[in-house]
Image (tube, grey):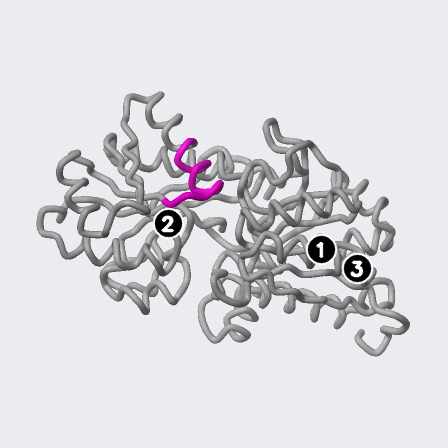
Amino acid sequence: MATQIRGSSVRIGALLPLTRPGWVEAGQHLLAGLELAVREVNDTGGIVGRPLELVVRDTAADPQRAAAAVDELARLGVAALAGEYHSVVARAAATRADALGLPYLCSSAVLDALTEQPTQWVARLSPPQSRGWQVYADFLLGAGHSRIAVATQPSVYWAAGTRILRDYVTSRGGTVIELDMSALTPSAVCDELVDRHATALLLLVGHPEPAVPIVKAVRGDQRLAEIMIGAPAGQPEFAEWATLLGDDGAAIPFLRYLPERLSPLGARVETALRERLAEAPSFVAFEGYDTVAVLAEVLRSHGADRARMAESWPRVAVEGTRGQIRFSRTPGISVWQWAGAPVQVVDRDPAEPDRFRILHADAAMSTTDNRNR
Protein backbone atom coordinates (compact mmCIF):
# COMPACT_ATOMS: atom_id res chain seq x y z
CA MET A 1 0.00 0.00 0.00
CA ALA A 2 0.96 3.67 0.03
CA THR A 3 3.00 3.26 3.23
CA GLN A 4 5.40 0.97 1.33
CA ILE A 5 6.47 3.74 -1.04
CA ARG A 6 9.98 4.99 -0.43
CA GLY A 7 12.88 6.68 -2.17
CA SER A 8 12.95 9.13 -5.04
CA SER A 9 9.98 9.43 -7.37
CA VAL A 10 9.71 8.12 -10.91
CA ARG A 11 8.61 11.10 -12.97
CA ILE A 12 6.37 11.27 -16.04
CA GLY A 13 6.08 14.52 -17.96
CA ALA A 14 2.50 15.43 -18.95
CA LEU A 15 1.68 17.77 -21.84
CA LEU A 16 -1.81 19.29 -21.71
CA PRO A 17 -3.78 22.25 -23.13
CA LEU A 18 -4.81 23.98 -19.89
CA THR A 19 -5.18 27.59 -21.10
CA ARG A 20 -6.61 29.25 -24.21
CA PRO A 21 -6.35 29.04 -27.14
CA GLY A 22 -6.04 25.36 -26.20
CA TRP A 23 -9.19 23.34 -25.69
CA VAL A 24 -9.12 23.73 -21.92
CA GLU A 25 -11.98 21.35 -21.13
CA ALA A 26 -10.23 18.56 -23.05
CA GLY A 27 -7.02 19.31 -21.14
CA GLN A 28 -8.84 19.16 -17.82
CA HIS A 29 -10.40 15.80 -18.63
CA LEU A 30 -7.09 14.40 -19.83
CA LEU A 31 -5.40 15.61 -16.63
CA ALA A 32 -8.14 14.10 -14.47
CA GLY A 33 -7.54 10.69 -16.04
CA LEU A 34 -3.77 10.95 -15.69
CA GLU A 35 -3.97 12.06 -12.05
CA LEU A 36 -6.49 9.39 -11.07
CA ALA A 37 -4.28 6.64 -12.48
CA VAL A 38 -1.17 8.05 -10.77
CA ARG A 39 -3.01 8.11 -7.45
CA GLU A 40 -4.10 4.49 -7.89
CA VAL A 41 -0.58 3.40 -8.84
CA ASN A 42 0.78 5.03 -5.69
CA ASP A 43 -2.00 3.57 -3.54
CA THR A 44 -0.87 0.10 -4.60
CA GLY A 45 2.86 0.47 -3.96
CA GLY A 46 4.02 2.79 -6.74
CA ILE A 47 6.70 1.65 -9.18
CA VAL A 48 8.44 -1.16 -7.30
CA GLY A 49 8.13 0.83 -4.09
CA ARG A 50 8.95 4.25 -5.60
CA PRO A 51 6.24 6.91 -5.96
CA LEU A 52 5.05 7.85 -9.44
CA GLU A 53 5.01 11.62 -9.99
CA LEU A 54 3.32 13.62 -12.75
CA VAL A 55 5.16 16.76 -13.91
CA VAL A 56 2.56 18.83 -15.74
CA ARG A 57 3.25 21.43 -18.44
CA ASP A 58 0.60 23.53 -20.20
CA THR A 59 0.99 23.63 -23.99
CA ALA A 60 -1.87 26.10 -24.59
CA ALA A 61 -2.19 24.46 -28.05
CA ASP A 62 1.15 25.99 -29.07
CA PRO A 63 3.55 23.63 -30.90
CA GLN A 64 6.63 25.72 -30.03
CA ARG A 65 5.66 25.84 -26.38
CA ALA A 66 5.20 22.07 -26.42
CA ALA A 67 8.62 21.48 -27.96
CA ALA A 68 10.21 23.72 -25.33
CA ALA A 69 8.36 21.80 -22.61
CA VAL A 70 9.73 18.51 -23.94
CA ASP A 71 13.27 19.93 -23.71
CA GLU A 72 12.64 21.09 -20.14
CA LEU A 73 11.09 17.81 -19.03
CA ALA A 74 13.96 15.84 -20.56
CA ARG A 75 16.43 17.96 -18.53
CA LEU A 76 14.36 17.33 -15.40
CA GLY A 77 14.93 13.62 -15.87
CA VAL A 78 11.43 12.36 -16.61
CA ALA A 79 11.35 8.71 -17.65
CA ALA A 80 8.71 9.33 -20.32
CA LEU A 81 6.19 11.80 -21.70
CA ALA A 82 2.41 11.46 -21.72
CA GLY A 83 -0.61 13.36 -22.91
CA GLU A 84 -1.57 16.07 -25.38
CA TYR A 85 -4.91 16.49 -27.12
CA HIS A 86 -4.21 18.77 -30.12
CA SER A 87 -2.72 16.87 -33.04
CA VAL A 88 -0.46 19.63 -34.37
CA VAL A 89 0.93 20.16 -30.85
CA ALA A 90 1.43 16.43 -30.32
CA ARG A 91 3.32 16.27 -33.60
CA ALA A 92 5.77 18.93 -32.37
CA ALA A 93 6.18 17.08 -29.07
CA ALA A 94 6.66 13.71 -30.78
CA THR A 95 9.25 15.12 -33.17
CA ARG A 96 11.22 16.59 -30.29
CA ALA A 97 10.89 13.44 -28.14
CA ASP A 98 12.17 11.37 -31.05
CA ALA A 99 15.17 13.66 -31.47
CA LEU A 100 15.99 13.48 -27.74
CA GLY A 101 15.41 9.75 -27.31
CA LEU A 102 12.58 10.24 -24.81
CA PRO A 103 9.67 7.75 -24.77
CA TYR A 104 6.33 9.46 -25.46
CA LEU A 105 2.92 7.82 -25.13
CA CYS A 106 0.50 10.12 -26.95
CA SER A 107 -2.88 9.98 -25.25
CA SER A 108 -5.39 11.64 -27.53
CA ALA A 109 -4.02 13.19 -30.75
CA VAL A 110 -4.99 11.40 -33.97
CA LEU A 111 -2.98 12.96 -36.83
CA ASP A 112 -1.54 10.03 -38.80
CA ALA A 113 1.90 11.56 -39.32
CA LEU A 114 2.91 12.32 -35.72
CA THR A 115 6.53 12.12 -36.92
CA GLU A 116 7.99 12.53 -40.39
CA GLN A 117 9.87 9.22 -40.20
CA PRO A 118 9.11 5.97 -38.35
CA THR A 119 10.26 6.15 -34.74
CA GLN A 120 10.74 3.66 -31.92
CA TRP A 121 10.28 6.32 -29.25
CA VAL A 122 6.60 7.23 -29.72
CA ALA A 123 3.45 5.17 -29.19
CA ARG A 124 -0.19 6.23 -29.38
CA LEU A 125 -3.47 5.18 -27.76
CA SER A 126 -6.00 7.06 -29.89
CA PRO A 127 -6.95 5.72 -33.34
CA PRO A 128 -5.22 7.41 -36.29
CA GLN A 129 -7.30 10.04 -38.07
CA SER A 130 -7.44 7.98 -41.26
CA ARG A 131 -9.23 5.12 -39.49
CA GLY A 132 -11.60 7.18 -37.36
CA TRP A 133 -12.64 9.55 -40.12
CA GLN A 134 -13.22 6.70 -42.58
CA VAL A 135 -15.56 5.16 -40.00
CA TYR A 136 -17.31 8.53 -39.87
CA ALA A 137 -17.52 8.65 -43.69
CA ASP A 138 -19.06 5.16 -43.68
CA PHE A 139 -21.70 6.45 -41.28
CA LEU A 140 -22.48 9.45 -43.53
CA LEU A 141 -22.77 7.36 -46.67
CA GLY A 142 -24.87 4.77 -44.88
CA ALA A 143 -27.24 7.53 -43.79
CA GLY A 144 -27.68 8.60 -47.41
CA HIS A 145 -25.42 11.66 -47.48
CA SER A 146 -23.54 11.88 -50.77
CA ARG A 147 -23.20 15.69 -51.06
CA ILE A 148 -21.18 16.64 -48.00
CA ALA A 149 -19.97 20.16 -47.26
CA VAL A 150 -17.04 20.77 -44.93
CA ALA A 151 -16.56 24.14 -43.22
CA THR A 152 -12.83 24.27 -42.68
CA GLN A 153 -9.99 26.45 -41.43
CA PRO A 154 -6.28 26.42 -42.39
CA SER A 155 -4.58 23.68 -40.34
CA VAL A 156 -2.58 20.53 -40.99
CA TYR A 157 -5.19 18.63 -38.97
CA TRP A 158 -8.24 19.98 -40.79
CA ALA A 159 -6.54 19.60 -44.18
CA ALA A 160 -5.74 15.96 -43.40
CA GLY A 161 -9.33 15.34 -42.34
CA THR A 162 -10.69 16.94 -45.50
CA ARG A 163 -8.39 14.81 -47.64
CA ILE A 164 -9.42 11.58 -45.86
CA LEU A 165 -13.10 12.39 -46.29
CA ARG A 166 -12.74 13.45 -49.93
CA ASP A 167 -10.75 10.39 -50.94
CA TYR A 168 -13.14 8.01 -49.21
CA VAL A 169 -16.41 9.66 -50.25
CA THR A 170 -15.53 10.43 -53.87
CA SER A 171 -14.27 6.87 -54.41
CA ARG A 172 -17.80 5.76 -53.52
CA GLY A 173 -19.59 8.20 -55.81
CA GLY A 174 -20.12 11.08 -53.40
CA THR A 175 -19.01 14.70 -53.40
CA VAL A 176 -17.14 16.75 -50.77
CA ILE A 177 -17.57 20.53 -50.99
CA GLU A 178 -15.02 22.71 -49.17
CA LEU A 179 -16.17 25.94 -47.53
CA ASP A 180 -13.25 28.16 -46.47
CA MET A 181 -14.17 29.79 -43.16
CA SER A 182 -11.39 32.35 -43.52
CA ALA A 183 -13.49 33.83 -46.35
CA LEU A 184 -17.09 33.08 -45.27
CA THR A 185 -19.40 34.28 -42.50
CA PRO A 186 -21.82 31.81 -40.89
CA SER A 187 -24.71 33.32 -42.86
CA ALA A 188 -22.72 32.98 -46.08
CA VAL A 189 -22.18 29.31 -45.21
CA CYS A 190 -25.96 28.87 -45.14
CA ASP A 191 -26.26 30.37 -48.62
CA GLU A 192 -23.52 28.07 -49.92
CA LEU A 193 -25.24 25.01 -48.46
CA VAL A 194 -28.49 25.92 -50.23
CA ASP A 195 -26.81 26.78 -53.54
CA ARG A 196 -24.76 23.57 -53.59
CA HIS A 197 -27.57 21.27 -52.48
CA ALA A 198 -25.53 19.80 -49.63
CA THR A 199 -27.32 17.37 -47.31
CA ALA A 200 -24.66 17.39 -44.58
CA LEU A 201 -22.31 20.01 -43.15
CA LEU A 202 -19.21 18.95 -41.22
CA LEU A 203 -17.54 21.34 -38.79
CA LEU A 204 -13.79 21.14 -39.41
CA VAL A 205 -13.20 24.28 -37.38
CA GLY A 206 -12.18 25.44 -33.92
CA HIS A 207 -14.38 25.47 -30.83
CA PRO A 208 -16.14 27.57 -29.67
CA GLU A 209 -15.29 29.94 -32.54
CA PRO A 210 -16.40 29.60 -35.27
CA ALA A 211 -18.14 26.24 -34.62
CA VAL A 212 -20.84 27.61 -32.30
CA PRO A 213 -21.88 30.57 -34.54
CA ILE A 214 -22.05 28.26 -37.57
CA VAL A 215 -24.37 25.83 -35.75
CA LYS A 216 -26.61 28.68 -34.60
CA ALA A 217 -26.81 30.12 -38.11
CA VAL A 218 -27.63 26.79 -39.76
CA ARG A 219 -30.14 25.78 -37.09
CA GLY A 220 -31.85 29.16 -37.47
CA ASP A 221 -32.16 28.97 -41.26
CA GLN A 222 -35.51 27.48 -42.33
CA ARG A 223 -34.04 26.57 -45.74
CA LEU A 224 -31.71 24.12 -43.98
CA ALA A 225 -34.21 22.38 -41.71
CA GLU A 226 -33.32 18.97 -43.16
CA ILE A 227 -29.52 19.32 -43.25
CA MET A 228 -27.39 17.19 -40.94
CA ILE A 229 -24.60 18.93 -39.02
CA GLY A 230 -21.64 16.77 -38.04
CA ALA A 231 -18.45 17.28 -36.04
CA PRO A 232 -16.05 14.36 -36.51
CA ALA A 233 -13.36 15.97 -34.33
CA GLY A 234 -15.57 15.59 -31.25
CA GLN A 235 -16.57 19.12 -30.28
CA PRO A 236 -19.98 18.02 -28.88
CA GLU A 237 -18.34 15.56 -26.46
CA PHE A 238 -17.77 18.18 -23.77
CA ALA A 239 -20.28 19.88 -21.49
CA GLU A 240 -19.30 23.34 -22.74
CA TRP A 241 -20.86 22.48 -26.11
CA ALA A 242 -24.25 21.80 -24.53
CA THR A 243 -23.96 24.89 -22.34
CA LEU A 244 -23.26 27.19 -25.30
CA LEU A 245 -25.75 25.68 -27.74
CA GLY A 246 -28.52 24.11 -25.67
CA ASP A 247 -30.97 22.18 -27.84
CA ASP A 248 -29.15 23.34 -31.00
CA GLY A 249 -26.14 21.24 -29.95
CA ALA A 250 -28.03 17.94 -30.02
CA ALA A 251 -28.18 15.51 -32.96
CA ILE A 252 -24.70 16.48 -34.20
CA PRO A 253 -22.78 13.22 -34.73
CA PHE A 254 -19.13 13.06 -33.66
CA LEU A 255 -16.37 10.52 -33.13
CA ARG A 256 -15.85 9.05 -29.69
CA TYR A 257 -13.28 6.44 -28.68
CA LEU A 258 -15.20 4.29 -26.21
CA PRO A 259 -16.54 0.71 -26.42
CA GLU A 260 -20.25 0.01 -26.52
CA ARG A 261 -20.02 -1.33 -22.97
CA LEU A 262 -17.35 -0.52 -20.42
CA SER A 263 -15.54 -3.38 -18.68
CA PRO A 264 -15.73 -3.62 -14.87
CA LEU A 265 -12.45 -1.65 -14.75
CA GLY A 266 -13.87 0.98 -17.10
CA ALA A 267 -17.06 1.27 -15.04
CA ARG A 268 -15.09 1.71 -11.80
CA VAL A 269 -12.86 4.35 -13.40
CA GLU A 270 -15.90 6.13 -14.84
CA THR A 271 -17.36 6.48 -11.34
CA ALA A 272 -14.10 7.84 -9.94
CA LEU A 273 -13.65 10.26 -12.86
CA ARG A 274 -17.21 11.52 -12.54
CA GLU A 275 -16.55 12.32 -8.87
CA ARG A 276 -13.25 14.01 -9.72
CA LEU A 277 -14.66 16.12 -12.57
CA ALA A 278 -18.14 16.75 -11.08
CA GLU A 279 -19.53 15.82 -14.52
CA ALA A 280 -19.62 12.89 -16.92
CA PRO A 281 -16.10 11.98 -18.05
CA SER A 282 -15.32 12.25 -21.75
CA PHE A 283 -13.43 9.59 -23.69
CA VAL A 284 -10.39 11.87 -23.28
CA ALA A 285 -10.39 11.27 -19.52
CA PHE A 286 -10.31 7.50 -20.14
CA GLU A 287 -7.40 8.01 -22.55
CA GLY A 288 -5.54 9.81 -19.77
CA TYR A 289 -6.11 6.98 -17.31
CA ASP A 290 -5.04 4.34 -19.83
CA THR A 291 -1.86 6.30 -20.62
CA VAL A 292 -0.60 6.05 -17.06
CA ALA A 293 -1.77 2.43 -16.76
CA VAL A 294 0.44 1.52 -19.73
CA LEU A 295 3.44 3.57 -18.61
CA ALA A 296 3.23 2.22 -15.06
CA GLU A 297 3.30 -1.35 -16.35
CA VAL A 298 6.25 -0.58 -18.63
CA LEU A 299 8.11 1.04 -15.72
CA ARG A 300 7.46 -1.91 -13.42
CA SER A 301 8.59 -4.42 -16.05
CA HIS A 302 11.52 -2.59 -17.64
CA GLY A 303 12.59 0.13 -15.21
CA ALA A 304 13.00 3.84 -15.93
CA ASP A 305 15.76 3.50 -18.52
CA ARG A 306 14.44 5.38 -21.55
CA ALA A 307 15.89 3.08 -24.21
CA ARG A 308 14.54 -0.04 -22.50
CA MET A 309 11.11 1.58 -22.19
CA ALA A 310 11.00 2.42 -25.89
CA GLU A 311 12.08 -1.09 -26.80
CA SER A 312 9.17 -2.50 -24.80
CA TRP A 313 6.28 -0.99 -26.85
CA PRO A 314 5.71 -4.16 -28.94
CA ARG A 315 5.58 -6.29 -25.76
CA VAL A 316 2.94 -4.19 -23.96
CA ALA A 317 -0.21 -6.06 -22.95
CA VAL A 318 -2.27 -3.97 -20.52
CA GLU A 319 -5.94 -4.20 -19.62
CA GLY A 320 -7.17 -0.62 -20.05
CA THR A 321 -10.52 0.95 -19.39
CA ARG A 322 -11.52 0.50 -23.04
CA GLY A 323 -10.02 -2.88 -23.88
CA GLN A 324 -6.75 -4.81 -24.06
CA ILE A 325 -3.98 -2.42 -25.11
CA ARG A 326 -1.26 -3.70 -27.41
CA PHE A 327 0.93 -1.78 -29.82
CA SER A 328 1.86 -2.73 -33.36
CA ARG A 329 3.23 -1.23 -36.53
CA THR A 330 0.33 -0.07 -38.70
CA PRO A 331 0.88 0.66 -42.41
CA GLY A 332 1.16 4.39 -43.03
CA ILE A 333 1.55 5.23 -39.33
CA SER A 334 5.00 6.34 -38.14
CA VAL A 335 4.57 5.49 -34.43
CA TRP A 336 3.65 2.39 -32.41
CA GLN A 337 -0.14 2.24 -32.61
CA TRP A 338 -2.91 0.68 -30.52
CA ALA A 339 -4.75 -0.78 -33.49
CA GLY A 340 -7.66 -2.05 -31.39
CA ALA A 341 -8.85 1.27 -29.96
CA PRO A 342 -12.67 1.44 -30.17
CA VAL A 343 -14.33 3.93 -32.54
CA GLN A 344 -17.95 5.09 -32.36
CA VAL A 345 -20.10 7.73 -34.00
CA VAL A 346 -22.43 9.21 -31.37
CA ASP A 347 -24.58 12.28 -30.81
CA ARG A 348 -26.44 14.00 -28.03
CA ASP A 349 -30.05 12.84 -27.76
CA PRO A 350 -32.41 15.75 -28.65
CA ALA A 351 -34.88 14.46 -26.06
CA GLU A 352 -32.18 14.34 -23.36
CA PRO A 353 -29.05 16.32 -24.38
CA ASP A 354 -26.93 14.92 -21.53
CA ARG A 355 -27.44 11.41 -22.94
CA PHE A 356 -25.37 10.09 -25.86
CA ARG A 357 -26.78 7.84 -28.59
CA ILE A 358 -24.48 5.36 -30.39
CA LEU A 359 -25.26 5.73 -34.09
CA HIS A 360 -22.47 3.66 -35.66
CA ALA A 361 -19.42 1.67 -34.58
CA ASP A 362 -16.39 0.22 -36.31
CA ALA A 363 -17.62 -3.28 -37.11
CA ALA A 364 -14.10 -4.67 -37.55
CA MET A 365 -13.10 -3.57 -34.06
CA SER A 366 -16.34 -4.88 -32.55
CA THR A 367 -15.40 -8.33 -33.85
CA THR A 368 -11.89 -7.97 -32.40
CA ASP A 369 -13.28 -6.81 -29.06
CA ASN A 370 -15.59 -9.79 -28.83
CA ARG A 371 -12.74 -12.17 -29.57
CA ASN A 372 -10.55 -10.56 -26.92
CA ARG A 373 -13.25 -10.97 -24.29
Q: Residue furthest bottom?
A: 3
| Picture disc at residue 78 | 3
Residues under labels 1 and 3: Cα distance? 10 Å
In the rendering, at what x and y percent does residue 161 appear?
43, 38
- Whether 288 is among the magenta residues is no
State whether the magenta stretch is mostly helix, strand or loop: helix
Asked if residue 94 is positioned above or below residue 303 in the image, the reply reads above
Give the residue drawn at x 39%, y 27%. Answer: 168
Mark 1 — residue? 70
| Picture disc at residue 205 | 2
Residues under labels 2 and 3: Cα distance? 34 Å
Q: Amino acid at mark 1?
A: Val
Start and end of the magenta stretch? 153-163
Q: Is residue 334 left or right of residue 205?
A: right
Give the residue drawn at x 13%, y 36%. Answer: 195
In the rendering, at what x and y percent does residue 148 appear?
27, 35
What element does badge 1 sit on?
helix
